[in-house]
């Protein structure tokens, strides 16, 4: 009996060494993907052909790193060919140099490029992967993400029920720890009165009922949502119309512990009611501010 091929969801996972590709790939596997790591580019099309004829497989994730030089040179052609018959998404993971250096020292693993000077290897890798980064559908900066947070970010975007048309990722963060580089939209809520200066609220996170009640009771918060909600209602459909697979929205306050988690939670609730695929990460809520 002849088996007919089908359209697949193909996720190509790549990026800087040490940025969390292996952790992310495991998260894809937990989300129901057929996963292969470090596959030679010459075999990718064969893998896709075989899996497209396998009834039990509808989505695959392929990990690629800088060691496959042929893939780097043939990247655009390979992706273009795959996109003729399948849905292809490219995820690029990166992190700050000092974070990557620390991770390599902690694991005592050599860099794939083999340079004795680790920073030189990182800079060379960044240059080699620059063309792929430009084509990425989603860029994830894992500098301040724990392995658990990175895994959660992936699994909430790719549930076993299947990937939807566009995923909205919300990130609450603290400006004192840096702006998330992957954010498409940024909203600064430092203008809101800060629970940090209220003794009974200071030790509590923004996910606690008391902090939430305080922030949402503020007149400034109510006026902010009166402006923000219509803006999101306007721009999100336009991003979807553009064909985007991801939209990352960052909401920041000073330390990322009180105001931004409250606001992010409220945005998430509203977007879920609109049947959007939403994930939320409180990046800095555990920091002591």
Image (cartoon, helix red, strand yellow):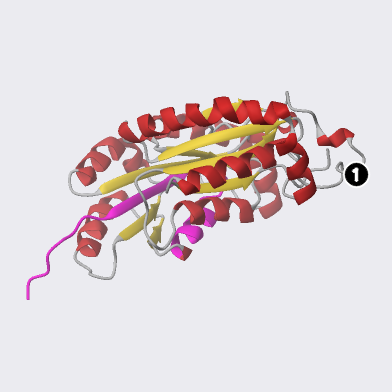
On the question of residue 76 being in view, the answer is: yes
Q: In this picture, is 4 found above or below 217?
A: below
Q: Position of residue 8 (x, y in %)?
A: 26, 55
Check the image and name the residue furthest to the bottom.
1
Left or right: 108 with respect to 65? right
Quadrant assignment, res 130: top left
Q: Is residue 3 magenta?
A: yes
Q: Position of residue 75 (x, y in %)?
A: 31, 39
Q: Residue at x 58, y 51 (%)?
A: 150
Quadrant assignment, res 95: top right
Report the front residue among 17 and 191: 191
Quadrant (top left, top right, bottom left, bottom right) of the C terminus: top right
Q: In this picture, is 35 found above or below 140?
A: below
Query: Which secondary structure lies at badge 1?
Result: loop
Tell me which segment is drawn in magenta.
1-29
List the residue tagged with mark 1: 200
């Amino acid at each position: 009996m002849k088996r007919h091929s089908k359209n697949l969801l193909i996720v190509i996972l790549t990026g800087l060494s040490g940025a969390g590709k292996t952790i992310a790939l495991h998260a894809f596997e937990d989300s129901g993907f057929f996963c292969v790591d470090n596959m030679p580019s010459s075999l990718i099309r064969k893998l896709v052909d075989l899996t497209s004829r396998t009834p039990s497989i509808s989505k695959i994730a392929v990990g690629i790193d800088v060691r496959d030089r042929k893939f780097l040179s043939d990247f655009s052609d390979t992706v273009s060919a795959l996109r003729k018959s399948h849905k292809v998404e490219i995820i690029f993971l990166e992190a700050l140099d000092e974070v990557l250096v620390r991770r390599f020292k902690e694991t005592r693993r050599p860099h794939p490029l083999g340079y004795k000077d680790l920073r030189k290897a990182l800079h060379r890798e960044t240059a080699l992967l620059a063309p792929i980064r430009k084509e990425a559908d989603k860029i994830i900066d894992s500098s301040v993400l724990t392995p658990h947070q990175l895994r959660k970010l992936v699994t909430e975007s790719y549930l076993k029920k299947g990937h939807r048309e566009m995923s909205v990722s919300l990130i609450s963060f603290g400006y004192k720890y840096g702006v998330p580089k992957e954010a498409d939209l940024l909203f600064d809520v430092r203008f809101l009165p800060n629970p940090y200066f209220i003794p009974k609220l200071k030790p509590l996170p923004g996910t606690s009922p008391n902090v939430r009640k305080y922030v949402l009771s503020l007149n400034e918060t109510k006026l902010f949502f009166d402006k923000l909600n219509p803006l999101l209602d306007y721009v999100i459909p336009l991003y979807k119309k553009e064909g985007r697979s991801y939209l990352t929205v960052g909401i920041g306050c000073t330390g990322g512990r009180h105001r931004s988690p409250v606001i992010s939670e409220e945005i998430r609730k509203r977007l879920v009611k609109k049947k959007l695929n939403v994930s939320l990460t409180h990046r800095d809520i555990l920091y002591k501010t």
